[in-house]
Amino acid sequence: MHRRLLDYGITVLGLLASGVWGLMGPLHSLLMRLRWKRFRMYQFKTRPDDVFIVTYPKSGTTWMQMIAWQLKSGGSLDFRHIEDVVPFIDRCGPAELPRLEALESPRFFKSHLSYEDVPPGARYIYVVRNLKDVAVSYYYHHLLMEDFRGGLDVFVKMLVNRRTNGGSWARHVLSWLEHRNAPNVLFLSYEEMQADLPGTIRRVAQFSGIALDEERLPLLVEQCSVAFMKKLEARFDPRLSRRGNFVRKGETGEGLRELDATLQAALAAEEQQVLDRARVLDSSGALERLLRGEAPTNGAATEAEPQKQQKMG
Ligand code: A3P
């Protein structure tokens, strides 16, 4: 009983902290992390065929949740909200345990945890998106969800000073980048998903051990398109009524259009940390291009997958 009270206490503090976004962002993430660690340590157990969809915020999480659910259900639209079928595990506590246990395998979960914090023993799809587009998308998210009233310049400053809930983009991406070739990790970019949605759906199916009915693929592609998801917007975010759209534009390159040279320069150091590491990890330059937000043109990023599938058994 006292454990549950402590969890509720941490949650209430976290929610209060998220209200005062600027200074409290990091406190909010710390409290959510503490709460999750307690839950993970004492109660939540992964299954080997669980699939965690992991991202830095605004990198295509909801899109990948929809892809996963469409694959798992064979194209069903019979769900009230995406988080009923692909729960946001970082926000789950003891009260959700029976619901999580009742989900059919393979279970899919959404998470924003770093590699170190995610529970081990499962499979992980990591989606990365270029920082400039993340920054613009996150800014609009703050206007919509967090009652943020500042301009893009104020927001970019908050982002680089790690005052948002997501913390450091570079730290998050780097924690996963090191493991991108592990047999239980599928490392994808938002931009390559956009460049080849049918190919992405095939890759996610293969990685998750779901037999894909090729005849249904056009339906799944249609239902995972930004236009289709916009029509079902309330199922992706319940706070829709506030102002603006949660499934917003779904485009690449908005960062370059909306951020002036000063704001792009402000993001450069954060971006460079990731690009430098990518150059060390992959001298061909393909990984660096992927992280810059360029979709691969020769399918090179898909090469390692058949092996992954074999190792997964
Ligand atoms: P924009 O704000 O740039 O439009 P997340 O789910 O991680 O919060 O990411 C949100 C971003 O993914 C938003 O980007 C949203 O529009 C985009 N998105 C959602 N569904 C999409 C889809 N089907 N295709 C492309 N982008 C999508």
Image (cartoon, helix red, strand yellow):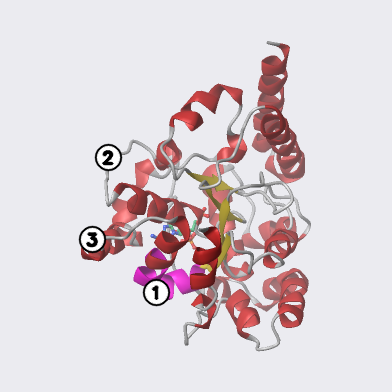
Tell me if 60 is positioned left or right of 169 in this view. Answer: left
Question: What is the CA distance from the residue labelled 1 to the residue labelled 2?
Answer: 26 Å
Q: Is residue 214 above or below residue 208?
A: below
Q: In the picture, residue 104 is in which quadrant?
A: top left
Q: Position of residue 274 (x, y in %)?
A: 73, 72
Identify residue type, mark 1.
Answer: Asp
Could you tell me which secondary element the residue under label 2 belongs to? loop
Q: Nearer the viewer, residue 159 or 107?
A: 107
Residue 192 falls inside the magenta stretch: yes
Disc nearest the viewer among 2 and 3: 3
Identify residue type, mark 2.
Answer: Asp
* Residue matched to label 1: 196
Q: Position of residue 71 (x, y in %)?
A: 35, 54
Circle number at residue 78: 2
Q: Is residue 3 above or below residue 45?
A: above
Q: In the picture, residue 197 is in which quadrant?
A: bottom left
Could you tell me which secondary element the residue under label 3 belongs to? helix
Question: What is the CA distance from the residue labelled 1 to the residue labelled 3?
Answer: 16 Å
Tell me if 290 is positioned left or right of 265 in this view. Answer: left
Q: Residue at x 25, y 65 (%)?
A: 214
Question: Which label's residue is closer to the chain start, 1 or 3?
Answer: 1
Circle number at residue 216: 3
Question: Which label's residue is closer to the chain start, 1 or 2?
Answer: 2
Tell me if 302 is positioned left or right of 199 in this view. Answer: right
